[in-house]
Image (cartoon, coloured by chain):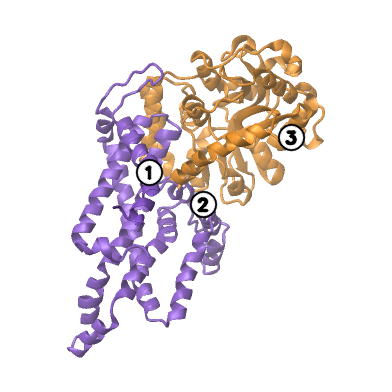
Amino acid sequence: MKSFKEYIAYPYGLWMLIFIAVPLLVVIWFSFLSNPDFKAGIYTFTLENYQQFMDPVYLELLYRSFLYAVIATLICFLIAYPLGNLIVSLPGHRQNMMIVLMIIPMWVNFLLRTYAWMVLLSGSGLISQFLGLLGFRDVSLLYTQSAVILGMVYNFFPYMLLPIYTSLKKIDPDLLRAATDLGANHFQMFLKIKVPLSLPGIVSGCMMVFMPAVSTFVISNLLGGGKYMLIGNLIEQQFLTLNNWNFGSAISMVLMTIIFLVLGIARLITGKEFDTGGQLL
Amino acid sequence: MKKIVLILSLLCLPFLAGGCGSDDRAELTVYNWGDYMDPEVIAQFEEEYNCRVNYETFTSNEDMYVKVKNSSDTYDVLVPSDYMIERLIREEMLRPITKDSIPNLANIDDSAKNLAFDPGNQYSVPYFYGVLGIVYNTAQVTDPVDSWNLLWNDKYASKILMYDSIRDSMGVSLKRLGFSMNETNEANINAARDALIAQKPLVMAYVTDNVKSLMASGDAAMAVVYSGDAAIIMSETDSLNFAVPKEGSNAFYDNFVIPKNAQNPELAEKFINFMLTPEIAAKNIEYVGYSSPNTPALALLDASWSENAGFNISNEDLARSEIFKDLPNDVMEIYNRAWTEINVSK
C-alpha cells in the first residue's frame, strides 16, 4: 500500500510534467525544425539551427557569457565564504538577524533593484559624485562591463551565502576542537577540516550563482546598455525581435546542455554528499 | 523570471475568462505602442460607447508582429508603422476599412494619406508621424548638428546614445554612407555594419526608453531619437534641441489597422473615428508629442507646441527622409546577422 506521502507528491509530479517537462520537450522539438508552418502542417527536420550556432560570432558570445558568469561567481564566493564564517561565529540570535538582513533586499523586485543601480551608477548618480569629490571627475560606471558583473554579484549573492552558511553551521564544533587538540594550527584546521566539510555548500552556492548569471539578459541589458550582449540576450532577441524561434530554441538547448555538464562535474567533485547536504536551506 | 511571469499569466487565464462573463459590455482589444495614447481618452471612449477596452502595449513593430502572428489572442485595433502595415497587408492579415464608418477621416491632412505602403488607405487610418533625428544638449555640443557624422565624432566619446533597434541604427549608418534606409545590397549593408562596429567604443549605450533621463541629467550629450520623443524630452528640459541630419533620415507613419480576425470590427471603427475627433486627437498629441496629421486638432494645442522643433517637422526634412519598406526575408537575414555582429563586437 502506498503511503500518504506518496499521494501528496502527485500534484507536484503533475505540475512538473505540465510546466517543466512538456515545455522543455517543445523547445527540443522546435530546435530541430526549420521554418515550420504549423497551419499548413509542414515540419522539416533539420540540424541547421545547431550548425548555425557553430559560427565564431556566436561561440565568442558563449565564451563571453561564461567568462562573466565565472567572474561573478568567483567574486560572490570570495565575499560569501569569509562572511559565512563570520556569521557562524556570532551568537545565535545575531546569526539569524544577519541572515534576515541578507534576505530582506530580495523582497524588493529584482528589476526594481537593478533600476536602482542604474541611478546609483549613472554619471550624475551618487557614486560618481562621491568619486568626483575625491578628485576622479567624469567617471561613468554605468554601461560598462564592471557594471554588468556588479549587477550579477549583487543580485545573486544571497544564493551563494545561504548554502555556504548552512554547510558551515552544520560542521560539528567538536571536530574543530579535536583538530586543534591534535596539534593542527589554525590554518591547517581551516584547510583540512572546514573547507572539505563545507565543500557541498560551496559547490551548491557556485551553481546557484553561475546558472542564473550565465543565462541572464536583463542585467546585461539594463546595466550594460546593450553594449555587452550575452547569450541570454541572443536568445531573447531570437524570440522577441527576430522571430526565429527555432534558432532561439537551439541556442537554449546548447546552453542547457553545457549547464548540465557543469552540474555533472560539480557532482563529481562533491561525490554523493551533493545530494544530501549543503543545499539551499 | 520570464517563465514565472508566463506561468502565472497562464494560471490567470481561466479567471480572466470568468471575469468577462460578469461584464456584459462589448469588448475591444487594442494593441498600441507604449505611451502612445492618453489613458484618459480611452476611459472617455469606454464611457461614451459603454464598452470595455483591453489596452495592451508593445515596444517595437517586430514584437507586435511576433505576438499577433503567433499568439492565440485576437486584437481589434493595432497601430503598426508603415513597413509593418505593408507586411500585414501582403500576408493578408488585415481587414479593409469601411470609410463610411470613419467620417473623421476628413480631418486628416492629405500629405499623410495615400502613401506607398497602403495606396488609397484601404486598410489603414493615419494616427501620428515623425522623423528620426538627433536630440542634443546645446551646452555640450559645440559643433553644428547637421550630419550623422556627429555620432562618429570622438570628441563626444561615451556621450552618444544610439537607438537599440536594428532598422533604425542600421538606417542611420546607411544614410551616413550615402545609401538608402532600405538598402538591399549585401556589401553596402556590411559597410554600414562595419561603421557601427567602429563607432561602438564611442557609444555610451544602445537604449530605447532610458533616453529621457540620460538626456535630462546631462549624462549624454546627444541621442538618436524619433521626433516626438524629442518633443516630449524638450518640453520638460531646457537646453535641448532637435535636428534632422542633411543626409536624410527615416520618416514613419503609424496608422490604425484592424486585423482580419478582429472580434469586434464595428466597434474598432468607432474607436478609430473617435480618436480622430479634433478634441480627442489634441489630447493625445499633448500626451504623446508626435506630429499629427489631424489639422483641426493642431489649432486646439497650447501655444508652446508651435515652437517645439521635435513636434514641427519641416517639409524639407520630411522630403529628405525615406519611409521604411518591408524587406524580403533573405535581406532581413543579412540585417539580423549584421546586428548580432555589432552587438557581439567589443
Q: Nearer the viewer, mark 3 or mark 1?
A: 1
Query: Mark 2 highlights which residue?
Result: A111
Hey, which quadrant is residue B142 in on the image? top right
State the mark number for residue B43: 3
Q: Nearer the viewer, mark 2 or mark 3?
A: 3
Q: Residue B313 location, x and y as percent?
A: 67, 28
Q: Residue A220 location, x and y as percent?
A: 43, 48
Amino acid type at circle 3 is: Ala
Hey, which quadrant is residue B30 in on the image? top right
Q: Which chain is purple?
A: A
Q: Residue A14 location, x and y as percent?
A: 38, 43
From this viewpoint, is residue B259 visible?
yes
- Mark 2 closeness class: few <14, some 14–19, many ≥20 residues within 10 Å: some
Q: Which chain is orange?
A: B
Q: Residue A192 location, x and y as percent?
A: 20, 77
State the mark number for residue A14: 1
User: A244 or A124: nearer the eye?
Assistant: A244
Q: Are marks 1 and 2 in contact (CB under 8 Å)?
A: no
Q: Residue at x 22, y 81 (%)?
A: A189
Q: Are marks 2 and 3 in contact (CB under 8 Å)?
A: no
- Mark 1 closeness class: few <14, some 14–19, many ≥20 residues within 10 Å: few
Amino acid type at circle 2 is: Leu
